[in-house]
Image (cartoon, grey):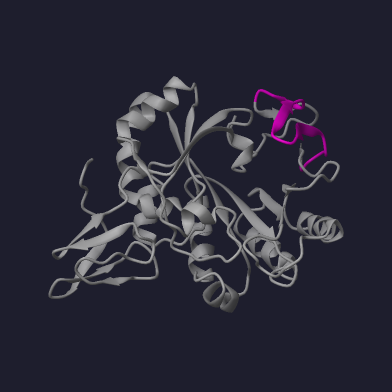
C-alpha cells in the first residue's frame, strides 16, 4: 500500500498542522485525523490516510450519477472512499460516508485497467465525497489520460479554489450537489458552506462539463427552488439541473417529497434553465432532453435507459441548433 503525502496543508505550530483542502481548515494534532478521516498527522507531516482505500466498486449507467449530458448511454466504473467532509443527516450513503468500514486498496494504475476491462470509458469518484480522495484522483489521472479514460466526480463541492484548479485540469465532468440556498442551513444542519459550493459550481463550469443536483426536502429547502434556478441561470442556462425526490432515511424527520411539489418545482426551474430533470420519481417528460430552440425531443429516457432520437452530427435534427451535450 502506497504511503502518499497529502497536498495543501501547512504547519500551524510545532507538529500541529492545518489542512487547506477544504474550507473547514482542520487543525490536526499528531496522530489525529481531520473531520473527513482522509488526512492524518504523522509526526508533523500530513498524509493521505485513505489513499486508494476503496469501499465500493460497481459498473453503472452514467445516467445514474446523474449525468444526462455527458457521454449519454455509456457505462461508468464507480468507486468510492470512506468518509466525507460534510455531515448531512439524511445521507443515503451514510454507511460509507459517516462510518468507518472495511476497504480494499486499489493502485491508481489498477483502477484504470479495471475500467478498460469492463469497457467503461469513464471512472466516477462517487457515493461518498471524492474531494477527500484528492491525491488519489490526481494520481489516477496520469494513467487515465494515457489510456483515454475520462474522470468524473459526484461531489458536494466543498473544496478550496487552488485544489479545485488542479482537479478541473484532469477531471472531465462533475455533478455537484447544491443542497439549499440557505447559508445557515448549510452550516448548522449539513456542516458545509454554501458560498464555497456556489463558487465551486461557477469555477468548475468555466472549465469542464457540470450538472447540478438538488435533493428537494419538504420543510428544509422546498422554498429555495426559484432562487436556486435563477442563480444557476446567471452562471449558465445550459447547466442541467436534476431535482431529486427525497425519501426519509436515518430517522430524519421530514416526509417524502410530494409529487405535486416536484411538479411545481420542475415548472418553476424551467422558467430559468434550458434543462431540468426530475429524479427518483416518474413525471412524464421530466427525464427527457428537449431542444431549447424548437422543443424537438433530443434524448428520450426511461429510468436509466436512454435513446438518442433527435440529434444528428451533434445538432438538433429539427432546427440545427448545436446540442449542449458531450456525445
Image quadrant holding the C terminus, namely top right
Nearer to the camera, 236 or 18? 18
Q: Where is residue 196 in the image (x, y as percent from the top left)?
A: 48, 66
Q: Is residue 40 left or right of residue 255?
A: left
Q: In this view, does 47 lie to the left or right of 276?
A: left
Nearer to the camera, 65 or 83? 83
Nearer to the camera, 274 or 134? 134
Residue 299 is covered by the magenta coloring: yes
Determine if residue 148 is in view: no
Image quadrant holding the N terminus, namely top left
Nearer to the camera, 106 or 184? 106
Q: Where is residue 260 in the image (x, y as percent from the top left)?
A: 87, 59
Q: Where is residue 132 in the image (x, y as percent from the top left)?
A: 38, 55
Q: Residue at x 34, y 59 (%)?
A: 162
Above or below, 110 relative to 210: above
How many circles with numbers are drawn on the protein?
0
Above or below, 210 relative to 310: below
Q: What stretch is highlighted in magenta?
A: 292-313
Q: Is residue 122 left or right of residue 260?
A: left
Above or below, 326 relative to 80: above
Residue 117 is covered by the magenta coloring: no
Q: Quadrant of residue 254?
A: bottom right
Amino acid at each position: 500500500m502506497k504511503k502518499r503525502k497529502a497536498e495543501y496543508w501547512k504547519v500551524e505550530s510545532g507538529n500541529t498542522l492545518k489542512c487547506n483542502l477544504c474550507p473547514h481548515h482542520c487543525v490536526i494534532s499528531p496522530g489525529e485525523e481531520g473531520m473527513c478521516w482522509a488526512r492524518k498527522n504523522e509526526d508533523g507531516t500530513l498524509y493521505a490516510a485513505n489513499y486508494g482505500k476503496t469501499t465500493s466498486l460497481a459498473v453503472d449507467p452514467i445516467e445514474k450519477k446523474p449525468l444526462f449530458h455527458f457521454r449519454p448511454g455509456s457505462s461508468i466504473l464507480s468507486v468510492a472512499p470512506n468518509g466525507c467532509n460534510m455531515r448531512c443527516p439524511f445521507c443515503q450513503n451514510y454507511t460509507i460516508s459517516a462510518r468507518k468500514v472495511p476497504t480494499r486498496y486499489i493502485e491508481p494504475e489498477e483502477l484504470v485497467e479495471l475500467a478498460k476491462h469492463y469497457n467503461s470509458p469513464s471512472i466516477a469518484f462517487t457515493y461518498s465525497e471524492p474531494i477527500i480522495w484528492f491525491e488519489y484522483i490526481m494520481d489516477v489521472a496520469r494513467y487515465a489520460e494515457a489510456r483515454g479514460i475520462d474522470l468524473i466526480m459526484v461531489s458536494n463541492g466543498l473544496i478550496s479554489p487552488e485544489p479545485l484548479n488542479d482537479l478541473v485540469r484532469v477531471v472531465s465532468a462533475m455533478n455537484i450537489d447544491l443542497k439549499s440556498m440557505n447559508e445557515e442551513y448549510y452550516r448548522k444542519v449539513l456542516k458545509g458552506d454554501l458560498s464555497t459550493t456556489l463558487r465551486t459550481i461557477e469555477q468548475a463550469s468555466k472549465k469542464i462539463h457540470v450538472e447540478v443536483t438538488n435533493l428537494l426536502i419538504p420543510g428544509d429547502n422546498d422554498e429555495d427552488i426559484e432562487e436556486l434556478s435563477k442563480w444557476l441561470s446567471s452562471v449558465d442556462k445550459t447547466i442541467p439541473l436534476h431535482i431529486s425526490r427525497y425519501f426519509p432515511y436515518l430517522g430524519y424527520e421530514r416526509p417524502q417529497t410530494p409529487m405535486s411539489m416536484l411538479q411545481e418545482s420542475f415548472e418553476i426551474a424551467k422558467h430559468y434553465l434550458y434543462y431540468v430533470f426530475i429524479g427518483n420519481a416518474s413525471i412524464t417528460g421530466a427525464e427527457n432532453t428537449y431542444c431549447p430552440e424548437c422543443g424537438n425531443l433530443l434524448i428520450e429516457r426511461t429510468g436509466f435507459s436512454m435513446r438518442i432520437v433527435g440529434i444528428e452530427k451533434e445538432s438538433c435534427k429539427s432546427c440545427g441548433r448545436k446540442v449542449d451535450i458531450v456525445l
